[in-house]
Image: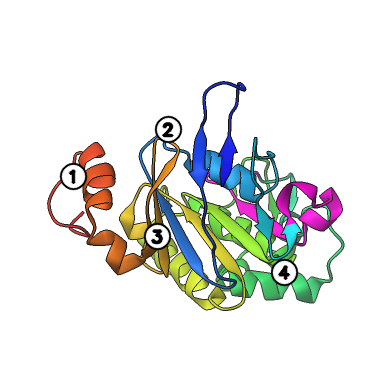
Amino acid sequence: AVEYSYDGVALALSGITLHIPEGQIVGVLGPSGSGKTTISQLLLGLREPTSGRVTIGSEDAAAISRSDALSTVALVPQEPVLLQGSVSDNIRFFRDFEELEVIDAAMSAHLHEDVVQMPAGYATLVGEGGGALSGGQKQRLAIARALIGSPKLIVLDEPTSAVDGRTERLIRQTVSELRGHVTVVIISHRIETTAECDLLLVLSNGKIADFGERDTVLAGSAYRNIVLTRHGLGGEPGSS
């Protein structure tokens, strides 16, 4: 079982044992402080477990070298960081990819149609804050940046928390199209964001409260008691 402590005393995660089949889409739900961020950092190899092992395929996540990590795991953060440069530069993100690979990644992220409408296409300049792009375009660019490296695992952190309805639909479509090709972990507090998930993991106080097929978890007491109650939603599962 995996355990993690930030201070060497209190456990932020304890008794974590689970297997995510390759190519599956997994949603991680839980209230603030439940351990969602810690789990994502362990999966990305940003932290090493205090005890236990986290493996991506047969590789220890914490032992993957920095160069190999870029082609093994990828993070799509809640607030993407954009560089001063072109759309292509931002998708490449200091890596050596051909323009066709950039376009292919943008198409997979359902960003291509937006880019070809821009004044200079993929050469269009965007600011450090992404001033020339909408929030939804920035989010899809971050997904293209993650996909271009052909990772085995992608972690999406609250991917639809601040985007418009069209972008949310496009992100769901992208996630659905990755099924069977890439393992996807979606960190969220919104059940709607997990619509494409095969499996759900519910965390509470750093422990697994429930893990299994999405419909089964949504019908269970852990989801109702922990996620719905703590967000003041109540009602039946999926009614939010």
Cβ atoms at labels 1 and 2 below 8 Å apart = no
Question: Mark 4 highlights which residue?
Answer: 150
Q: Is residue 143 above or below residue 135?
A: below
The crowding category of the residue bearing disc 1, from other C-alpha atoms within 10 Å (few below 14, some 14 to 19, many at least 20), is few
Which residue is the site of mark 1? 233
Q: Which comes sooner in the sequence, label 2 or label 4?
A: 2
Distance between the alpha carbons at the discs numbered 2 and 3: 18 Å
From the top left corner, tell me how far across and down residue 52 is, in percent. 64, 45
Dot 1 or dot 2: first in sequence order is 2
Give the total number of marks visible in the rendering. 4
Few, some or many C-alpha atoms within 10 Å of disc 3 (few <14, some 14-19, many ≥20)? Answer: many
66 is within the stretch colored magenta: yes
Residue ID at (75%, 59%): 59
Amino acid of disc 2 = Gly
Q: Quadrant of the C terminus?
A: bottom left
Closer to the camera in the image, 1 or 161:
1
Q: Looking at the picture, which amino acid does disc 3 mark? A: Leu
Task: Assess whether mark 4 and mark 2 are in contact (beta carbons under 8 angstroms).
Answer: no
Q: Start and end of the magenta stretch?
A: 60-81
Query: Does residue 139 show up?
Result: yes
Q: Amino acid at mark 1?
A: Leu
Disc 2 marks which residue? 33
Which of these two is toward me, 93 or 137? Answer: 93
For the residues labelled 1 and 2, the Cα–Cα distance comes to 18 Å
